[in-house]
Image (cartoon, rainbow, N blue to C red):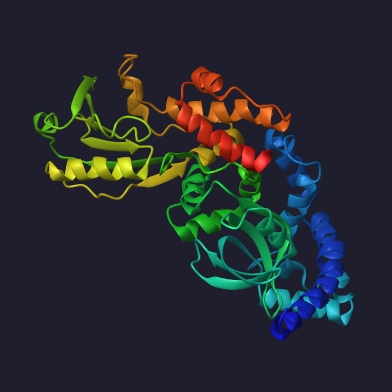
């Protein structure tokens, strides 16, 4: 380790010793008592018990400690409310100095990727929503890095020590999620989320549902051939659509004022790119499960004269959709129009996504028990092709096997 990082690491360790006494041994218990955090704890245990019971035994106690410290030390945190309390004034001078320093340098949450690893246990991270870069000291992140999470999206709580940031508490390293997934999840949690800024506001207001994403952090990116399987969706308002013109390049179906347009190249696996037009409302929905499928569907429609933005409104991974439905205990409906078309031979629907999720549920017990599953049989059971099934199995096995 070069001299510069040796000095920073030494500073990190000295701060950690005081921080352990101030934050872990004093502040957590002090704030928990003053703010009746036991009530919060019972509420969270009840709300998320279906997730907590699947996690390691110390999971809830760790995130509860992180929740309290986060509420205490972030900008405008609870520490400001009690800074003149007699118990805080009775702390030693170094301990009071640390508290004052933390007030002047608030802690923060971050969703970040590693962009450089300059030294052991030191990382240069890029925040995906604040769009800044920072140096962090984190032995926990080093363990994840060495365990194959180099490209993971990290969710961390961290404090600044004067030289660099230091991670605190549980580090969530999400292999199958990206920033778009987190944003989509945020919009399902709160109607106020409509920008990167409001997304992070929702995290500071209540980080607990974001902690629960740890339940899906090991799910891999799902790949079929050269394509990542994700949902891409966009809605455009069309004053009037020349459906006859579209029929020159698309196969069409109609039901209850809704047209469904499919193309023999892009509406088949793995792309499932399909357009829906509601002639009553003027709504045009583009829906696909690969970026290539969505882009080509959009380009075809634009070339036919439609004035639409080629960019999707949102994209979400199969891993995130599966995880958030589990956390929120509800079905997330993205394409309601597919229910209009029930002919078995004509359906191109989100059940493909459901099938992928079901396959992951079926294959994990085999991997955990050390048994080799019959991939073809499981793929047939849930209704996905063998190539996609094998790809999912290989990725999940690499992580859990």
Can see residue 48? yes
Reply above or below: 129 against 257.
below
Q: Is residue 14 above or below residue 186?
A: below
Q: Residue 388 appears at what percent x and percent y? A: 47, 32
Q: Nearer the viewer, residue 367 or 360?
A: 367
Up-down: is 111 above or below 59? below
Tell me what residue is drawn at x 49 percent, y 47 percent.
Answer: 181
> With 259 as the anchor, is 178 left or right in this view?
right
Q: Residue at x 37, y 41 (%)?
A: 290
Between 368 and 310, the one lying in front of the other is 368
Residue visible at 11% across and 44% down in the picture: 305
Q: Residue furthest bottom?
A: 3
What quarter of the picture does the C terminus occupy? top right
Q: Quadrant of the N terminus?
A: bottom right
- Of 271 and 172, the residue lying toward us: 271
Q: Is residue 278 left or right of residue 185?
A: left
Total residue callouts: 0
Residue 203, image x, y percentages: 58, 55
Q: Is residue 149 left or right of residue 99?
A: left
Residue 236 at least partly seen: no
Relative to 291, is 326 above or below? Answer: above
Q: Going 38% across and 34% down the picture, which residue do you hit?
A: 270
Viewer-nearest residue: 252 or 5: 5
Percent coordinates x, y for residue 273 in the rendering = 31, 35
Q: Locate residue 182, reporting x and y percent.
A: 52, 50
């Amino acid at each position: 380790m070069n001299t510069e990082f040796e000095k920073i690491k030494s500073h990190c360790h000295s701060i950690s010793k005081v921080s352990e006494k101030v934050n872990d041994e004093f502040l957590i218990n002090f704030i928990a008592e003053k703010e009746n955090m036991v009530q919060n704890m019972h509420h969270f245990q009840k709300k998320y018990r279906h997730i907590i019971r699947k996690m390691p035994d110390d999971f809830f106690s760790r995130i509860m400690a992180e929740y309290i410290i986060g509420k205490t030390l972030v900008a405008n945190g609870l520490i400001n409310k009690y800074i003149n309390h007699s118990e805080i004034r009775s702390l030693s001078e170094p301990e009071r100095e640390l508290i004052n320093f933390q007030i002047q340098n608030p802690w923060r949450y971050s969703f970040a990727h590693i962009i450089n690893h300059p030294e052991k246990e030191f990382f240069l991270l890029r925040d995906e929503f604040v769009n800044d870069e920072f140096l962090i000291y984190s032995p926990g992140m080093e363990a994840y890095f060495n365990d194959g999470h180099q490209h993971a999206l990290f969710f961390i709580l961290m404090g600044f020590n004067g030289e660099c940031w230091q991670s605190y508490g549980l580090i969530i390293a999400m292999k199958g999620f990206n920033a778009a997934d987190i944003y989509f999840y945020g919009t399902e949690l709160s109607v106020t989320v409509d920008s990167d800024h409001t997304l992070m506001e929702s995290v500071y207001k209540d980080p607990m549902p974001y902690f629960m994403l740890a339940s899906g952090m090991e799910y891999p990116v799902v790949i079929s051939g050269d394509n990542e399987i994700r949902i891409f969706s966009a809605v455009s308002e069309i004053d009037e659509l020349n459906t006859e013109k579209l029929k020159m390049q698309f196969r069409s179906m109609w039901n209850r004022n809704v047209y469904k347009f499919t193309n023999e190249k892009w509406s088949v696996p793995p792309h499932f790119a399909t357009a829906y037009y509601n002639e009553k409302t003027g709504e045009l929905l583009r829906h696909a499960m690969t970026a290539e499928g969505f882009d080509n569907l959009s380009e075809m429609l634009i070339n036919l004269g439609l004035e639409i933005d080629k960019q999707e409104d949102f994209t979400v991974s199969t891993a995130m959709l599966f995880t958030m439905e589990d956390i929120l205990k509800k079905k997330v409906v993205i394409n309601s129009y597919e229910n209009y078309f029930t002919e078995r031979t004509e359906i191109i629907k989100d059940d493909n996504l459901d099938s992928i999720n079901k396959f992951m549920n079926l294959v994990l017990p085999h991997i955990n028990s050390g048994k080799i599953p019959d991939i073809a049989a499981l793929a047939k059971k849930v209704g996905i092709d063998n190539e996609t099934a094998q790809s999912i199995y290989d990725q999940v096995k690499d992580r859990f096997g």
